[in-house]
Amino acid sequence: MDDRDSNLSRSARAALTEEFGARRAFARHWRESVRYFGWARSLWELAGAAGSALLELLPSRRKARFGDLDYDWEHSIDTTRSKVGFGTQFLAGVTARPYFATEPWLFEQIMQAIPEDFSQFTFVDLGSGKGRILLMASDYPFQRIVGVEFMLDLHRVAQKNITSYSNDRQRCTQIEAVCMDAREFQFSEAPLVVYLFNPFSEPTFARVLENLRQSIEPSPRDVYIAYRFTEFDRLLEQADWLEKVAGAEQWAVYTNVLPTLRR
């Protein structure tokens, strides 16, 4: 195994031994929210997240829960929200953001906007859910693909999907799903494409971005952040170590820019 992936592998092995219960996940989310927002806004954010999660019970949201089923039918996998239990979806909505699967055409659009030869890159999906992005990324020649998901139910489905997935266009078979809190994830020292489908609350997103910045300082390399559904895009815009290289209504791509971080 490449030495530059050793940090990632150690974190992956440690993560597989840890499961995240609802109480622990909520407690950590609440503590971090209070530090970031203060008590008053944290209560407001919690109420809003709980309300949004409860809205998913409405019959009018049924169609959205199924999403793009064609991709699942084509590959005999399960990546939509249709079989996600309410408890899992509610916890994800309160502590982070509800699970959605990215549309294949949109992912292809994002990947075309990254001007790199992916053969030297590791692909990381933070908040990987059932693993659809991991499978779609495997159509590109990445050295390695890693998904990070803290919801155990979603993580287990992702593992099954990775095992059963078959596609003649697949160009990377080194795919790994780990169950852990993204705030504890140690980024590989390889060049990175980091994908996020708006998986976190604002405090968690800020923490993960800072972890990524700190990982680049001792190991300068090219890093791209592909951000789908840009609710907290201002955090990326305000980061002086990033610049936007592409974007559309539903997504944005950033890369690191400081001279000390570039080859």
Image (cartoon, grey):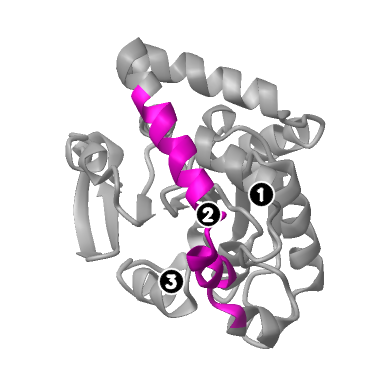
Question: Of the numbered discs in the image, which one, if any, rests on residue 234?
Answer: none
Residue ID at (56%, 32%): 186
The answer to which of 65 and 174 lies nearer the viewer is 65
Q: Position of residue 157 (x, y in %)?
A: 76, 58
Mark identifier at residue 107: 3
Which residue type does callout 1 highlight? Phe
Tell which circle, 3 or 2, labels the residue nearer the N-terminal end.
2
Depicted 30 relative to depicted 117: above or below: above
Rate crowding at label 2 as few (under 14), some (14 to 19) or many (20 or more) other CA atoms within 10 Å: some
Does residue 180 belong to the magenta stretch? no
Near-viewer residue (51 or 166): 51
State which quadrant residue 215 falls in.
top left
- Mark 2 = which residue? 56
Q: Position of residue 129 (x, y in %)?
A: 62, 53
* Res 131 visible: yes
How far separated are the C-alphas under marks 3 and 2?
A: 24 Å
Numbered disc 1: secondary structure: helix
Magenta segment boundaries in residue numbering: 44-69
At x 33% / y 66%, what residue is drawn? 114
Amino acid on which disc 2 is placed: Glu
Give the number of the mark in front: 1 or 3: 1
Q: Do labels 2 and 1 touch, CB within 8 Å?
A: yes
**Mark 1 Cα shell of 10 Å, populated few (<14), some (14-19), many (≥20):** few
In three-dimensional space, the C-alpha distance between marks 2 and 1, rounded to whole angstroms, equals: 8 Å
Q: Quadrant of residue 150 in the image?
A: top right
Task: Depth check: give the residue in front, 192 or 18.
Answer: 18
- Say which element carries label 2: loop
The residue carrying mark 1 is 86
How far across and how far down the image is residue 193, in percent?
Answer: 44, 55
Q: How many marks?
A: 3
